[in-house]
Amino acid sequence: MIAVHSWAELSVFLAFFALVTVMGFIASGWKRADNHAKLDEWGLGGRQFGVWITWFLVGGDFYTAYTVIAVPALVYAVGAYGFFALPYTIIVYPFIFVVMPKLWKLAHSKGYITAADVVHGTYNNRFLELAVALTGIVATMPYIALQLVGMKAVLSAMGLQGELPIILAFLILAVYTYSAGLRAPALIAFVKDLMIYVVVIVAVVIVPMKLGGYGAVFSAADAAFQVKGGNTGLILKDAQMLPYATLALGSALAAFMYPHTLTGIFAARSANTIRSNAVLLPAYTVLLGLIALLGYMAHAAGVKVSSPTDVVPVLFQTLFPGWFSGFAFAAIAIGALVPAAVMSIGASNLFTRNVWKAYVNPAVTEAGEAQVAKIASLVVKVGALACIVFLPTKFAIDLQLLGGLWILQTFPALVFSLFTRWFRAPALLLGWLVGIGWGTVTAFSDGLVPVHKLVFGGDTYAIYVGLLAFAANVVVAVIANLVLSAVSPRPVSSQA
């Protein structure tokens, strides 16, 4: 069903969408090696991306379409609590600087393509490898679906209702990702990020000018939150501070465990490329803070929506001419394509190396690996698309909350091994199982809200459930390792 809001808006949107589609197909010949039929060529772009390409690629799959839609929506709905994404991005960059170059060096020297490759190479345990691989694949699926949620929001705002427009968009994505692999999102990320920067900078300058300045914006938002009451407002309530802090910390620890963010790391040219990116990436945090302010601006503009997800599209349509809102919507939609492509590639790399090659066809050739990964990337996209077409949008959002909890449980197996070999694989596997099991059961019993309330000494503490599950994971792994060490000490020559 089509009921076009503005033909100028739709025309600009389609023009930029066509531009990135052409770029996606051109990318198959960009920085191409002599032998393209290898998994690290298709799935990691030949491990040759320098500082700027890596900066755009990592930023492109870390700051997604759903970020542009969801962060202002949360700020619009609850106020200051919605800004928890800012400290978590600040926390994560020192982590990248310290940890990711070590991980890159190990992966580069051994030819590893996935996190599960690293885990298997370190512990020589297929069960732990499989646990990390399946966790990455399952946690990524709802994350891709959320990119569709962001795209669907702007398509609906333009009057393109129903599932057909989003299906067509993802069919195009599937075709050029199949052909070009990681090179396609890496090339498109340049356009996507520049467009997002233009949109946000124009918005944070023009919108306050139209609404009477930032003083008027904050006053209007404050008045709206006072009417709404509850845990909303421009300043965090006392009860919100602990969940705010634990959400930020847990999200930071989980962020670079996802297959798509690690794919950007493994595709870098050198360890120094990653360190340089850790220094440059805070520019995206500034951008994220400006994006979050759109939630306050929507209150000042008098935006009323049935779903907070519609806040950003309605704000742009209210305050800007059709051609610029079309440009903004194109930026958001392209911001869905880049991370969705990298996510599907990351998940397909895991399936190919750590499921197919490990259990189905250990003798698969390099060309065979690349072909399996291409097919798997299509299946992953279709699965994510099915989540949006056949399941309620809220279900996809709830699954993504679980995805963050799940992927965080792979942290000990992947990161601890970079600094110590004290842990044994069975102990890490048991810790993973407890973290996944307890966290999932607790999240469902709480109604899939991100924080869990603990009662201790008569006081109640609300803490991010993923971080609690991670703590249980580590404690169990430590205890199990102590027991294993007591029962079966390692030979002195093998201790590290």
Image (cartoon, rainbow, N blue to C red):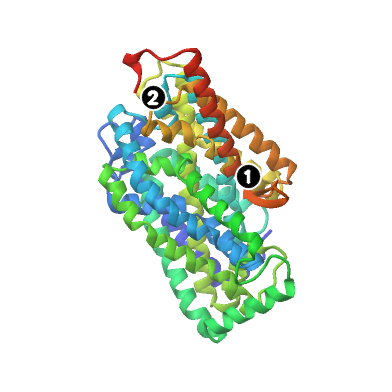
Foreground disc of the pair 2, 1: 1
Q: Where is 381 relative to 191, above or below?
A: above
Q: What x and y, as percent, mark residue 218?
A: 58, 78
Could one spot residue 327 in this view of the protein? no
Q: Secondary structure at mark 2?
A: helix
Identify which residue is drawn at 54% across, 30% down.
Answer: 134
**Amino acid at the residue labelled 1:** Val
Determine which residue is flagged by label 2. Answer: 122
Q: Are marks 2 and 1 in contact (CB under 8 Å)?
A: no
Q: Please name the residue shown 48% across and 41% down the image.
A: 258
Q: Relative to residue 183, is residue 5 depicted above or below?
A: below
Q: Residue at x 66, y 34 (%)?
A: 438
Give the camera-side residue of 282 and 347.
282
Mark 1 lies on residue = 465
The quarter of the picture where the C terminus appears is: top left
| N-terminal label among 2 and 1 | 2
- Place of residue 347 in the rendered image (x, y in percent of width and height, measured from the top left): 49, 36
